[in-house]
Image (cartoon, helix red, strand yellow):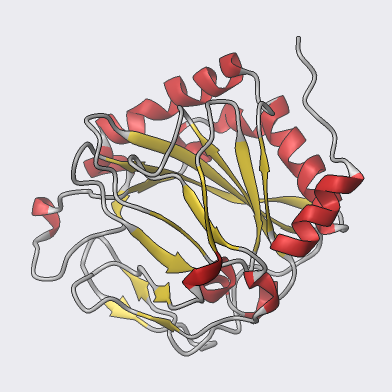
Amino acid sequence: MRAYPTCSDEQRRCFDANGYLVVEHAVAVNDVTQVRENCDVIVEKRHKLAFDWAWEKNTPREARKFKIVQGSPSRTWPGINDTRLRRWMIAFGSALLGKPIEFWYDQYLAKPPFEGAELYWHQDEGYWGRNLDERGITCWLPLHDVDVANGCMHFIAGGHRDGVLEHFQPEHIQSDLLYCEPDTSRSVACPISVGGVTFHHGKTPHMTPPNTTDGWRRAVTTHMRVVGSEGEGDHYPWKIYVNQFTGERTVPSSR
């Protein structure tokens, strides 16, 4: 069984400088296949197991197009919590952040062929709130090769040092999707082959472009936080919750 890589001093310095890190050939392909096979059900039964993160306004719930399928691997496949993949992400992320971290929550994010929507520039802390200030890190695992055409990660190099930017709600979107407006002159596209992952700091602006190919773009994000941290809270003024069963939009009391 191939060993997962350990975090080097050079990788720590790169992460500290840029706010993100690409780790090529980190995950055994058979481990990626296991994740994909256990998460395919989220796409197949998306009307029951997932939300549409790109749910457009004036579109009834039953007519959602699921241009960004958003589900939870750990809910549909609890066994993922005991995989060496998850243990490795926590260990590697702890080394990058310089603090012991723990699993918080995960997301399965899939974009359909040809019309998978852009996931706008945003910062994870913009969603999480001040409770997670400098206390969160995310690992993004594509379940196949990714490039600009099907929606690979893009990061703002050094953007984690710019603070939390103001976020906005797209006028045409009914879901809780947010966006910010970073300095895109520092944007870096990160195409990677299956088995590669990216890590990014909670303040690093990032996005994925639309999927313009003839296949699904599938990925799993694993969000981790410093051990002992509170959950999200002490939110910024733009935070909103959307009930995807009723369409009701509410603001958090801690906003």
Residue at image coords 46%, 38% = 219
Extreme-right residue of the structure: 9
Q: Viewer-proximal residue, 204 or 98?
A: 204
| Location of residue 114 by image quarter | top left
Q: How many marks on residues? A: 0
Residue 193 x/y as whole percent: 53, 28
| Location of residue 226 by image quarter | bottom right
Q: Is 16 placed left or right of 173 in the picture? A: right
Residue 70 x/y as whole percent: 37, 49
Residue 140 x/y as whole percent: 56, 44
| Location of residue 78 by image quarter | top right
Q: Viewer-proximal residue, 183 or 36?
A: 183
Against 124, residue 25 (above or below) is above
Q: Is 32 placed left or right of 246 in the picture? A: right
Against 66, residue 167 (above or below) is below
Against 215, residue 106 (above or below) is below
Location of the N terminus (image quadrant): top right
Residue at image coords 14%, 58% = 61
Residue at image coords 42%, 29% = 39
Q: Viewer-proximal residue, 50 or 134?
A: 134
Q: Viewer-proximal residue, 197 or 187?
A: 187
